[in-house]
């Protein structure tokens, strides 16, 4: 559905290129010689059965894991010596599969941490409440209030996130990633464990962000219906290898993909 | 008490004014026993300041560091030597430099936190406690080659006026503690504190948001040690009135740790509540022993009781109220206000 409408941000050139990545833990290969790209402004889905290496892939892009082989290039720069911190500075933000919120902090404070890269005041400015720090805090707070409003979580913004239901926590986490104003968002199962209604809302948020700000999205999702609905292109991973790559309709018709999902045994 | 608002709320101003009137006017005018100043108020403020330091590193940044007393010793001996060797250095100047020296040492001993965490870090930071005391003992220069082992602290002189009476010293400390508490609250509520807490709650996510773990942890160690250093200097110059490394032993570090936990991890007012409780508790027990039971209970039993009750309290708080007495206080306040509204 996304491809048929006229979009504010036309899908452009590759913004992220993953070239021949291999990652193994001990003797177990999580990802084997995998390549794909992500185009600017597109919504790219990564799907695959459990243990296919989807989250490992995001962790490689994000700098948490260091692939043994291959390279990743973002906006034409090869990411070498990468740490999550440097990746964030380059404009990639993310959410996590098993929620990685700051549990004892309120929702708005969680989102405010996402403004870190837009904060220039150092601890002395903050301690002495110099005009610089105050001004910056005001701007950041305003920005985060906008995100809170957009995600419709005004009521719970002062609640410690550890006390929130799962669906809302997922939303706060999306908010935190949005607050970074990153050009590429990695969403690791943003809709896992949600009911139909919550999923629909989450889809709406994702598409609206993509539409409004042109943010490129890479998302992992299990619900095929959701994937078909919101993504422009889909990568299918199975046992750490790519078995399908293309528009949703094409991937859905791919025999390898069907086999992987229906559990046809490998190596035949 | 949302940490998001950096400008102060109305209740902040009210609290501030009430506390200032109480601290600077009511207490000096109504309390006329030196005992209360020298044995309760002065050590309370000093240890509360050190506990804020412990809060920064443990309560806010989540790094299990044990060794506050070591940094207090560093601050105390730095202050002693600065006043001794630098002519014309004002007391507050010496105090700030002492804090900075403690902060520098804190950064060095904070380095292990980049590799290890939890209980292992606690063991590693214990090294600071023993190392600092050992260095001070080992090299006579720090003690100005005094052979007695106990050095009398210099008088506090500010703008040519000596501050030596208990009330005077109390006021000097109160000024320092007030200023530093405000700075701590500003940091804790602002972006600095959010970065600390992000590292505490989920370091991988914090890093993915662009928070540098290296910078944030070392910054917290430095600030924590700065507070401990200043607290140590004040503690030595006003409470102990002498400088002896033994006064800053591991027991004091544990005491500060308990003040931090009982008061409530990750709270600034908890530092004051925790320090007050731990200081006043033995006084209260003694009072009960003497006045309620009229000496029927032996003093040794009372001091043993103290240990037992402390232990039980620690366990109870860990289980039922990890946020400590500061949270209890919040709950009580809320209930009172609700009743008033009805």
Image (cartoon, rainbow, N blue to C red):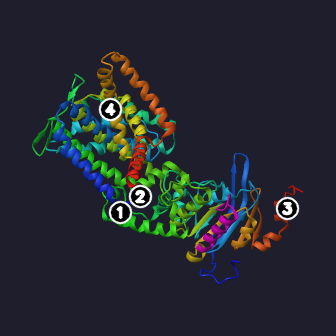
- Give the CA separation, mark 4 to mark 1: 37 Å
Q: Main secondary structure of the magenta part?
A: helix
**Are labels 3 and 1 on one chain?**
yes
Magenta segment: does it hold A153?
A: no
Element class at badge 3: helix
On the image, the x and y values in percent for residue B159 come to 11, 46
On the image, the x and y values in percent for residue A53 come to 71, 56
Comparing marks 3 and 2, which lies closer to the viewer? 2
- Give the CA separation, mark 2 to mark 1: 9 Å
| Residue that carries the numbered disc 2 in the rendered image | B191
Q: Residue at x 39, y 55 (%)?
A: B341
Q: Is residue A180 visible?
A: no
| Residue that carries the numbered disc 1 in the rendered image | A133
Relative placement, left or right, of B84 versus A221 is: left
Q: Are marks 4 and 1 in contact (CB under 8 Å)?
A: no
| Residue that carries the numbered disc 4 in the rendered image | B279
* Front-lying residue, A194 or B195: A194
Check the image and report above or below for A86 versus B103.
below
Q: Residue at x 23, y 44 (%)?
A: B174
> Which chain is home to disc 1?
A
**Are labels 2 and 1 on one chain?**
no
Part of the protein shown in magenta: A189-208
On the image, the x and y values in percent for residue A121 come to 37, 61
Q: Quadrant of the N terminus of chain B?
A: bottom left
**Are labels 2 and 4 on one chain?**
yes
- Give the CA separation, mark 2 to mark 4: 33 Å
Magenta segment: does it hold A190?
A: yes
Element class at badge 1: helix
Check the image and report above or below for B312 versus A165.
above
On the image, the x and y values in percent for residue B325 come to 41, 41
Q: Quadrant of the C terminus of chain B?
A: bottom left
């Amino acid at each position: 559905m996304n491809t048929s409408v006229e979009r504010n941000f036309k899908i452009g050139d590759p913004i992220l290129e993953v070239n021949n990545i291999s990652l193994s833990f001990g003797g177990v290969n999580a990802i084997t010689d995998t390549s794909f790209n992500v185009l600017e402004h597109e919504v790219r889905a990564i799907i695959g059965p459990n243990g296919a290496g989807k989250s490992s892939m995001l962790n490689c892009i994000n700098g948490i894991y260091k692939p043994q082989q291959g390279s990743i290039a973002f906006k034409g720069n090869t990411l070498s010596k990468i740490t999550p911190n440097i990746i964030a500075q380059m404009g990639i933000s993310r959410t996590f599969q098993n929620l990685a919120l700051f549990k004892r902090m309120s929702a708005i404070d969680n989102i405010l941490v996402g403004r870190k890269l837009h904060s220039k005041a150092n601890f002395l400015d903050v301690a002495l409440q110099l005009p610089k720090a105050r001004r910056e805090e005001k701007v950041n707070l305003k920005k985060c209030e906008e995100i809170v409003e957009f995600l419709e979580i005004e009521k719970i913004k002062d609640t410690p996130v550890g006390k929130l239901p799962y669906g809302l926590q997922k939303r706060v986490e999306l908010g935190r990633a949005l607050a970074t104003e990153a050009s590429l968002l990695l969403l690791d199962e943003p809709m896992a464990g949600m009911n139909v209604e919550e999923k629909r809302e989450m889809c709406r948020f994702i598409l609206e962000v993509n539409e409004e700000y042109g943010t490129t999205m890479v998302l992992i999702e299990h619900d095929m219906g959701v994937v078909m609905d919101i993504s422009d292109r889909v990568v299918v991973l199975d046992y750490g290898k790519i078995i399908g790559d293309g528009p949703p309709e094409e991937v859905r018709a791919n025999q390898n993909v069907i086999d992987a999902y229906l559990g046809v045994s490998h190596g035949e | 008490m949302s940490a998001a608002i950096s400008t102060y709320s109305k209740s902040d101003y009210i609290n501030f004014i009430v506390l200032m009137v109480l601290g600077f006017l009511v207490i000096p005018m109504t309390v006329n026993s030196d005992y209360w100043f020298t044995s309760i108020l002065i050590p309370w403020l000093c240890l509360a300041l050190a506990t804020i330091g412990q809060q920064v590193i443990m309560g806010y940044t989540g790094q299990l560091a044990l060794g506050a007393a070591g940094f207090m010793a560093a601050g105390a001996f730095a202050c002693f030597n600065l006043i001794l060797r630098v002519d014309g250095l004002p007391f507050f100047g010496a105090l700030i430099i002492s804090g900075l020296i403690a902060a520098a040492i804190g950064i060095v001993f904070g380095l292990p936190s980049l590799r290890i965490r939890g209980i292992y870090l606690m063991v590693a930071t214990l090294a600071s406690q023993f190392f600092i005391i050992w260095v001070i003992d080992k090299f006579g220069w720090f003690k100005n080659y005094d052979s007695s082992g106990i050095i009398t602290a210099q008088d506090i002189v500010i703008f040519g006026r000596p501050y030596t009476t208990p009330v005077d010293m109390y006021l000097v400390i109160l000024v320092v503690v007030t200023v530093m508490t405000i700075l701590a609250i500003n940091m804790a509520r602002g972006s600095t504190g959010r970065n600390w807490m992000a590292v505490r709650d989920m370091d991988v996510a914090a890093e993915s948001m662009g928070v540098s773990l290296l910078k944030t942890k070392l910054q917290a160690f430095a600030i924590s040690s700065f507070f401990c250093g200043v607290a140590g200097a004040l503690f030595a110059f006003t409470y102990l009135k002498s400088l002896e490394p033994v006064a800053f032993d591991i027991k004091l570090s544990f005491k500060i740790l308990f003040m931090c936990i009982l008061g409530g991890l990750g709270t600034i007012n908890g530092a004051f509540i925790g320090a007050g409780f731990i200081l006043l508790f033995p006084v209260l027990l003694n009072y009960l022993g003497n006045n309620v039971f009229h000496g029927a209970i032996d003093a040794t039993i009372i001091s043993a009781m103290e240990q037992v009750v402390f232990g039980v309290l620690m366990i109870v708080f860990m289980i039922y109220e990890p946020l400590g007495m500061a949270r209890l206080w919040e709950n009580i306040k809320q209930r009172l206000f609700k009743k008033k509204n009805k």
